[in-house]
């Protein structure tokens, strides 16, 4: 009897999650700081969202912000005017950049209301684009000679991740296994998608047979998303690779227009970004492994999705009918059958616990 209940419980729980891939999403306006403009960049497993928003009145001062529990908080700066929040981990640590008192753009971490400047590679400009659950951040930093390299920050120190033989590189994301991805120039000056691991940088640009230019995200399974122009195309296509060297890169297509861009990836292999329509507008999308789903807008022409967590919550921005840009969250709407199965799963959990208690 116990084995049967275990089987039914796991079956009900699994079926109850199938609604996440149903293709139906509601859109929620996250609010702003009063300046009439905001973008949500990233979301963690606990639903904390980071991004940026304009301060009221000024119209030009952008601040890194954190949305949680229905409120929005200005994360502040390093004594300068502006900042931006670009990544967040499951501990709630935010990474991005903040201006210092001299107006320099400096890679920064926020832990609660404490902001910390990260060391540079010798120059005065740097940005932290991504952070993993171990608190290791990646991004880029200028060197003293004016070029910039991908950088990794850990325990208060910085490491130059190098290039593919050229002058420039940027790391956009790092997973919990310590694999970082981004773009790096080679000795011919061409930008190539790259992964940095224990053995140094690996050129991923040739996986598709085309000219991929960047890898903006990697998940804990080693799956990667790409930007670039594949063979036979003239414009950028969002693309997905499952991490297996024997598997091809999958081009995600568009909504009938010329190009698409991928920005976020979760551990289920869902991809989010934006894709062009035939009429020249672009909409946020989620790709669930089988199809690209249009997430829509707030009544305007444009939207873009930057991040997705493992619960399927998606964040980004969308325009309203008046042309204003709002930070938004797209929430999966389970199908009625999935809701019933979810309730069945919950009921079986309660029954299982009661039986175990007796």
Image (cartoon, rainbow, N blue to C red):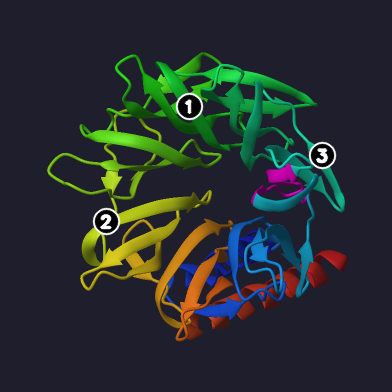
Residue located beneath label 3 in the image: 116
Residue 246 % position (x, y) = 29, 29
Q: Say few, some or many: other residues with alpha carbon within 10 Å of mark 1 (under 14 / 14 to 19 / 20 or more).
A: many
Give SS at disc 3: strand
Residue located beneath label 2 in the image: 259
Q: Which of the labelled discs sits on residue 169, or is there none?
A: 1
Residue drawn where x is 53% and y is 48% of the image: 267
Q: Is residue 29 magenta?
A: no
Q: Is residue 34 left or right of residue 20?
A: right
Q: In terms of depth relative to the viewer, which is nearer, 221 or 217? A: 217
Q: Is residue 93 magenta?
A: yes
Kindly indicate the quadrant of the structure image that contains residue 131.
top right
Q: Say few, some or many: other residues with alpha carbon within 10 Å of mark 2 (under 14 / 14 to 19 / 20 or more).
A: many
Kindly indicate the quadrant of the structure image that contains residue 48.
bottom right
Task: In the rendered view, tell whether residue 131 sits above or below residue 342.
Answer: above
- Number of dots carrying numbers: 3
Q: Are marks 3 and 1 in contact (CB under 8 Å)?
A: no
Q: Earlier in the sequence, mark 2 or mark 3?
A: 3
Residue 283 % position (x, y) = 37, 69
Residue drawn where x is 37% and y is 32% of the image: 244
Which of the image's four quarters has the C terminus? bottom right
Q: Is residue 2 visible?
A: yes
Residue drawn where x is 32% and y is 29% of the image: 205
Residue 272 % position (x, y) = 44, 58
Principal secondary structure, stretch drawn in magenta: strand
Mark 2 → mark 1, Cα distance in angstroms: 24 Å
**Which span is picked out in magenta?**
86-99
Mark toward the viewer: 2 or 3: 3
């Amino acid at each position: 009897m116990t084995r049967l209940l275990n089987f039914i419980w796991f079956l009900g729980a699994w079926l109850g999650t199938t609604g996440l891939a149903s293709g139906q999403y509601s859109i929620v306006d996250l609010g702003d700081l009063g300046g009439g403009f905001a973008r949500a960049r990233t979301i963690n497993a606990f639903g904390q969202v980071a991004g940026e928003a304009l301060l009221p009145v000024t119209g030009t001062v952008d601040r890194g912000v954190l949305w949680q529990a229905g409120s929005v908080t200005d994360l502040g700066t390093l004594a300068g005017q502006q900042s931006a929040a670009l990544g967040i981990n499951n501990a709630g640590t935010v990474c991005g950049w903040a201006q210092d008192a001299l107006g320099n753009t400096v890679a920064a971490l926020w832990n609660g209301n404490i902001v910390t400047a990260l060391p540079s590679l010798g120059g005065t400009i740097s940005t932290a684009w991504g952070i993993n659950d171990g608190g290791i951040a990646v991004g880029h930093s200028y060197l003293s000679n004016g070029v910039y390299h991908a950088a990794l920050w850990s325990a208060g120190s910085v490491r130059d991740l190098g290039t593919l033989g050229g002058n420039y590189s940027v790391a956009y994301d790092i997973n919990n296994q310590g694999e970082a991805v981004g773009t790096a120039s080679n000795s011919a000056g061409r930008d190539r998608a790259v992964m940095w691991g224990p053995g140094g940088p690996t050129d991923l640009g040739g996986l598709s047979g085309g000219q991929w230019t960047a890898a903006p995200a990697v998940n804990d399974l080693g799956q990667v998303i790409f930007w670039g122009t594949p063979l036979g195309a003239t414009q950028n296509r969002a693309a997905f690779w499952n991490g297996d060297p024997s598997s091809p890169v999958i081009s995600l297509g568009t909504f009938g227009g010329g190009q698409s861009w991928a920005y976020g990836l979760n551990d289920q292999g869902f991809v989010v970004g934006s894709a062009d329509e035939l009429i020249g507008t672009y909409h946020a999308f989620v790709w669930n492994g089988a199809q690209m789903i249009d997430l829509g807008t707030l009544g305007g022409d444009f939207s873009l999705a930057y991040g997705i967590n493992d619960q399927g919550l998606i964040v980004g921005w969308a325009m309203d009918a008046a042309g204003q840009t709002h930070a938004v969250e797209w929430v999966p709407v389970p199908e009625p059958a999935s809701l019933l199965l979810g309730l069945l799963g919950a009921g079986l959990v309660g029954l299982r616990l009661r039986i175990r208690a007796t």
